[in-house]
Amino acid sequence: MEYRILKSVLLLCLSVFSSAAFSNDGEFPNRELYPEVPYISIQDLHKQKDNTEIVDVRSAYEYDTLRIKGARNIPLNSSDFIERVKTLRTTSNKPIVFYCNGKTCKKSYKATRKALKAQIQDVIVYDAGIFDWAKQYPNDSELLGKSPIKPEQLISSAQFKAHLLEHNDFIKKASNNSIILDIRDPTQRDGLFIFNGSEIPIPMDNAKMQKYIDMAKNENRTLMIYDAVGKQVRWLQYYLEDQNLKSYYFMEGGAKSFFDELLSNYQ
């Protein structure tokens, strides 16, 4: 009985949100791109969080860094995504709410659409994303496994950009007094390295990276880190800041920015 009432309330909320989809002045651009996908506001999800199954569809590393408290992780790019969502549905009759990073992130919409096509019932997208949630509901958020969080712990765009270097400047700054880490996935490297193999290939794993963080601090060296396209380093920054590392830089645009320029010079 309680579930039917909750479901009715959710459907009512969703119908209101759907009718107002085009009055958001572009704040939620994916609502127009995915008109068949129902969505829920940040306020209503918070009210109903104990009566929903909240699923984070980002990578495991993003989830481990910052997440909605109590959410489970089913990455959209996992090969068994639908099977895992179906398993969740067989163990719970609560509405399943998918979320990702923010208002322009499409992963949560793609996840909901994929679930709908697989005929999984009562799936919804929460599209304001983790950052809005963490700012508004710090007591219901986890950062590096700790809760509650402090909103000032969230890294601003300015703080992130302060550690970004354009690829030519990044290469110039890399020296004998630096430790260069290549955190690309092995499938993204394809045998291509920027520093002729003098960089250290390492996965996005805080425990494995700790050795080099300690080395940089103890030997007063700078960590120079690059990923594939410049997006994953923003999550690594939370751990570097938590470890009180002062001297570190990321390559803006990742390895792609370097190789794109290299290719353009030969065209």
Image: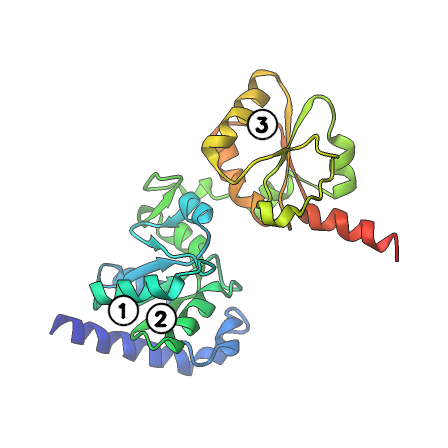
Determine whether 111 is above or below 152 in the image. Answer: below
Mark nearer the N terminus (2 vs 3): 2
Label 1: few (<14), some (14–19) or many (≥20) C-alpha neighbours in 10 Å: many
Label 3: few (<14), some (14–19) or many (≥20) C-alpha neighbours in 10 Å: some
> Percent position (x, y) of residue 189?
65, 46
- Label 3, on which residue? 246
Q: Residue at x 52, y 33 (%)?
A: 240
Nearer the viewer's eye, disc 3 or disc 1? Answer: 1
- Label 2, on which residue? 124
Q: Which scheme is used to colour this image of the protein?
A: rainbow
Determine whether 225 is above or below 37 in the image. Answer: above
Question: Depth check: 138 or 230 in front?
Answer: 230
Q: What is the CA distance from the residue labelled 2 to the residue labelled 1?
A: 7 Å
Q: Quadrant of the N terminus?
A: bottom left
Q: Which mark is on residue 95?
A: 1
Contact between marks 2 and 1 (CB within 8 A): the answer is: yes
Residue 197 at least partly seen = yes
Q: Residue at x 17, y 75 (%)?
A: 5
Residue 43 at least partly seen = no
Three-letter code for the amino acid on which mark 2 is drawn: Ile
Label 2: few (<14), some (14–19) or many (≥20) C-alpha neighbours in 10 Å: many
Q: Among all residues in the image, which is located at the extreme left?
A: 1
Q: Is residue 62 left or right of residue 71?
A: right
